[in-house]
Image (spheres, coloured by chain):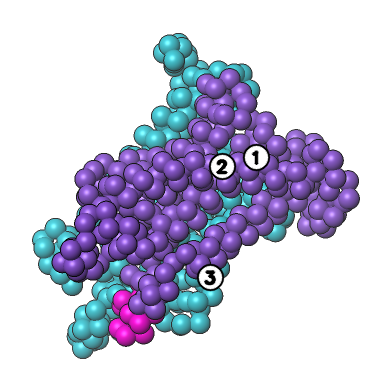
Chain colours: A cyan, B purple
Amino acid sequence: MGDIPKYLSDAGTRAALLDMLLDHVYLSLVPLVVSVVLAIVLGLLCHRFRQVNATLIALSNVVYTIPSLALFAIIPAVIGTQVLDPFNVILALTVYTTALLVRPVAEALAAVPAHVTAAATAMGFRPLRRFLTVELPLSVPVLAAGVRVGSVSNISLVSVGALIGTGGLGTLFTDGFRQRYLAPIIVGIVLTLVLALVVDLLLVLLRNRLTPWVRAGGAP
Amino acid sequence: MIFADAVAWLLDPVNWSGGKSIPVRVGIHLLYCLGAVLGAALIAVPLGLYVGHTGRGGVVLVGGSNALRALPTLGLVTFLYLVAGGGTAGVLIGLIVLAVPPILAGTYAGIQDVDRGVVDAASGMGMTGAQRLWRVEVPNALPLLVGGLRNAMLQVVATASVAAYVGIETLGRPLLDGLRVLDYGQFVGGAILIALLAVVLDVVLAGVGRLVVPAGLRLAAKARRAGSGKARSSGAQSRRRGEPAPVESGGSTA
């Protein structure tokens, strides 16, 4: 372990680490943002149409069962991208995160008390406005819990992409293994954990900002 | 067409016999997975039961298993492989480390979720702590416990594929070899096998879950669902991934 300072002392290594870290952030957070939007739309469909609900939940369970390495390989075969295209990893993680989020979103929407929606309707809210300003905000705590799990799992999964040429910090693991050198592997693990922790803290802050009524002690 | 190549690779008799054939690799993959889940269960189930039953250390446990979930699997496997100086021991330890959090979380959440009224009734009937644990809490916790085992199995199946990178002969091997020699049929064929194995194992464990969960519990859940409609159903069904309170639920790193 004594060679970590030596490993980090090289300015070129540090610059490369920063690049990989930014790459990692991009690869893990783009799918997160895209799938939040997708999951809200799909969750709304699930909430409104029973049939869609059963199908989507079953589908997302199957998707969630497929190991990441397999999905990374199957996606280019399905949509015809290059095998080493970073888009494959982004799409795979988007699929996972969406599958993770659809059910909580649908359940959170279903859990909005009927008297609250009725009050909004009585105040003259049209369905779209009611959804965006009443039902969706009330679902934020549940959505946020799902997003936190999604961010941790994305940040950890991006590394697997290193095996197919797109790995962010995961490249440190393949490099370290090839050179039989522990320092980059340890640095990679630590940076991944720290990144996951920082993103999680930011998500908690964001959730608290979006749900001021929780701290004020009010119930919907 | 890549899929045609993949099917051709899957059906090629050459890949179905010999020391590096598909059946041998499926077998090795299964051995690693079963060994790891069994090993992890031996550690995680007693610990989860203890913490759930006594209520001591729950916060530490949930926090700790969440932190473990952020561990990059490839990093853990390469790290342990180099530290252990090669061989299967490093890989197996890595798999066990990754399988512990979901089982622990499932066991703990299962015990915690047991209706307090039921536990109080058991105490009121004069049951001792151990009787309460084994005859009331454990049977009631089984759905979530099995959910934890399923999550652990998914995690381990995925990681055993990734671990082919350090040289073990699991189903990740044909995939990685296919990529190296640019044989995309083999690359995608290997991926399809991994996905199939994961789905089949999950279905098998779901079936085992149905067998071991007491019939009374299923009836109670059904009655609850039918009785009070949609609002309650989320609680009755929240047995695994994607549930509303995922902080203490099973793993999600596929």
Residue, x 58% and y 45% (percent of image)? B33
Majority secondary structure in the magenta region = helix
Which residue is tagged 1? A164
Is A187 rendered above or below residue A165?
Answer: above
Front position among marks 3 and 2: 2
x and y, in percent, of residue A137 in the image: 27, 67
Q: Amino acid at mark 1?
A: Ile
Of residues B140 and B168, which is closer to you in this image? B140
Q: Work out which quarter of the rendered image holds the N terminus of chain A and state it.
A: top left
Q: Residue at x 21, y 88 (%)?
A: A122
> Between disc 3 and disc 1, whose residue precedes?
3
Give the spatial CA distance, label 3 vs label 2. Answer: 29 Å
- Helix, strand or loop at disc 2? helix
Relative image position of residue B206 (x, y in whole percent): 53, 64
Question: What's under tag 2, amino acid-wise?
Answer: Gly
Name the chain under label 2: B
Badge 2 vs badge 1, beta-carbon distance below 8 Å: no
State which chain disc 3 sits on. Answer: A
Q: Which residues are magenta?
A: B222-234
- The relative height of residue B229 versus residue A7 in the rendered view (above or below) is below
Whole-percent x, y for residue B197 in the image: 65, 54
Task: Answer left or right for B154 relative to B125.
Answer: right
Circle nearer the viewer, 2 or 1: 2
The residue identified by callout 2 is B35
Callout 2 environment at 10 Å: few (<14), some (14 to 19), or many (20+)? some
A130 in magenta? no
Q: Secondary structure at mark 1?
A: helix
> Taking B173 as reference, is B208 above or below it?
below
B116 lies left or right of A76:
left
